[in-house]
Image (spheres, rainbow, N blue to C red):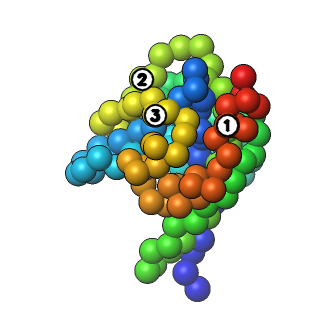
Amino acid sequence: MKPIFPAVKAVIIHNGQFLVLKKAGVEGDVWELPGGRMNFGETKGEALFREVQEETGLQVQPFILYDTWEFFQPEYQITGVIYLCEKPDGDVRLSSEHQAYEWFPLDASSLERMDVVFASRMVRWDFEAIQGFMS
């Protein structure tokens, strides 16, 4: 049986935009959401806090569980959840895992630059409702 790894991602929202990261060593204009795999014994909230802190230096708190995502490879699967979070105080400080960050507009125009794993889920989102909810 092939392994399935649980993971968490954050859509960190600030002033009508959301934070995206570019993985180190990745060619092209492809961006992902902060977050990563859970460790044994962690809750989803604890994993989100740890992963976002490690990758960005930000100390987010899960705000609302919004969606799920799946990533399939020949030898494993990652199954994850996406939380909407408000940006906490502080500046983004990237780890060595990522080479850049940007704030994308919280709308469908940003999806063409997102990794297909996340863009395929986000295309169905109601961005206006999210902005209203997070205001």
Q: Please say if the residues under marks 3 and 1 sit with CB atoms less than 8 Å apart.
A: no
Q: Amino acid at mark 3?
A: Phe
Q: Residue at x 45, y 29 (%)?
A: 103
Q: Amino acid at mark 2?
A: Arg
Residue 89 lies in what quarter of the image?
Answer: top right
Crowding near pointer 1: few (<14 within 10 Å), some, many (20+)?
few
Is 18 drawn above or below residue 8 in the view shown?
above
Mark 3 secondary-structure assignment: strand
Q: Please say if the residues under marks 2 and 1 sit with CB atoms less than 8 Å apart.
A: no
Residue 121 lies in what quarter of the image?
Answer: bottom right
Q: Residue at x 30, y 36 (%)?
A: 99
Quickly name the residue at label 2: 93
Which of the two labelled residues, at mark 3 and mark 2, occupies the earlier sequence position? 2
Q: Nearer the viewer, residue 12 or 109?
A: 109
Q: Label 3, label 1: how many angstroms apart (C-alpha)?
A: 15 Å
Which numbered dot is residue 104?
3
Q: Residue at x 29, y 47 (%)?
A: 29
Which numbered dot is residue 128?
1
**Going by the image, does 111 lie left or right of 122?**
left
Is 124 drawn above or below residue 101 in the view shown?
below
Give the foreground label among 3 and 1: 1
